[in-house]
């Protein structure tokens, strides 16, 4: 605790790693939780606005049998610790379902990792892929916690504007994306459908991102928080 010249106790400054979580675009916004921030934004939304936040929990709550099954498997403590990648039987089921949804083969051993929630998955993946020196390109806007995790890790964030209009439909600014790639970023992170706007990119936009990534040898991490709500084919 710090003491000011008048003898009153002053709050200690935040640690540097905490200060890095501040988002420049949200300066002055103070909310007790992410949901409170969501609701503050939704309150200013126009009529007819579709709220897609927390679709996985609010719109689709767990089935009634989930609590009973969870309690039963935890009784003897046998499931207290699982393999780091998750149980093989569960990963196999996830691989089958994901492969059928995306129209591509998914290997449960090479392509599937079970994590305790979205935040844990994002943190683990960004910690492994992000290069502090080279920086990461991120669509703007995008999922709030992607940027916060990158800032916590001390990674430079290069913003790529998201264009919502135009004849071609929603798309990242491809000129800005190429400029970021040319400048040396090693990773491009984007959500699709875009979170928070819900925008769905045309196949041509996805193909353009892929071409640039190959040309500049940049890793692309596509995060998809609501695949089951969209019809997706092999493309």
Image: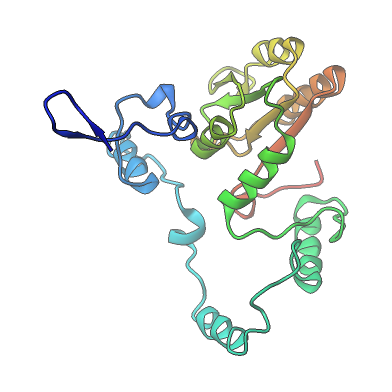
- Name the quadrant containing residue 100: bottom right
* Quadrant in the picture for the N terminus: top left
Question: Is residue 170 something that shows in the picture?
Answer: no
Residue 217 position (above or below residue 114): above
Going 83% across and 22% down the picture, which residue do you hit? 211
Q: Give x and y (percent) for residue 49.
A: 38, 39
> What's the residue at 60%, 52% (across, down)?
120
Location of the C terminus (image quadrant): top right
**Residue 21 placed where, x, y %?**
46, 32
Residue 187 figure quarter = top right
Residue under the image location 81 percent in, 70 percent down: 88
Against 156, is 118 above or below? below
Front residue of this view, candidates 176 and 82 = 82
Vertical comparison of 11 with 54: above or below: above
Residue 135, horizontal then vertical, whole percent: 67, 22
Numbered label tally: 0
Instruction: Using residue 55 as the reference point, say whether residue 174 is left or right of it.
Output: right
Nearest to the observer: residue 90 or residue 8: 8
Residue 94 makes an appearance in the image: yes
Left or right: 193 as drawn, with respect to 131 = left
In the image, what residue occupies the spot 69% across and 14% down?
A: 180
Q: In which quarter of the image is residue 93?
A: bottom right
Of 161 and 82, the residue lying toward us: 82
The location of residue 185, given as percent across then percent down, is 72, 19
Give the left or right position of residue 36, taking residue 71 as reference.
Answer: left
């Amino acid at each position: 605790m710090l003491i000011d010249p008048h003898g009153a106790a002053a709050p200690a400054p935040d640690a540097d790693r905490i200060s890095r979580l501040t988002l420049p675009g949200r300066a002055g916004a103070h909310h007790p939780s992410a949901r409170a921030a969501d609701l503050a934004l939704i309150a200013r939304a126009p009529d007819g606005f579709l709220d897609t936040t927390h679709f996985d929990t609010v719109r689709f709550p767990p089935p009634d049998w989930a609590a009973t099954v969870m309690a039963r498997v935890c009784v003897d403590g046998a499931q207290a610790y699982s393999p780091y990648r998750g149980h093989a039987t569960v990963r196999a089921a996830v691989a089958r379902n994901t492969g059928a949804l995306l129209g591509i083969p998914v290997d449960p051993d090479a392509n599937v990792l079970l994590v305790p929630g979205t935040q844990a998955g994002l943190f683990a993946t960004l910690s492994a892929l992000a290069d502090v020196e080279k920086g990461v390109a991120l669509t703007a806007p995008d999922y709030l916690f992607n940027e916060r995790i990158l800032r916590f890790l001390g990674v430079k964030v290069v913003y790529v504007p998201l264009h919502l209009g135009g004849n071609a439909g929603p798309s990242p600014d491809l000129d800005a994306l190429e400029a970021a790639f040319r400048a040396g970023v090693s990773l491009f992170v984007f959500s699709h459908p875009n979170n928070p706007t819900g925008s769905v990119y045309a196949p041509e936009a996805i193909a353009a991102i892929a071409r640039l990534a190959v040309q500049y040898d940049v890793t692309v991490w596509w995060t998809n928080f609501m695949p089951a709500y969209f019809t997706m084919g092999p493309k």
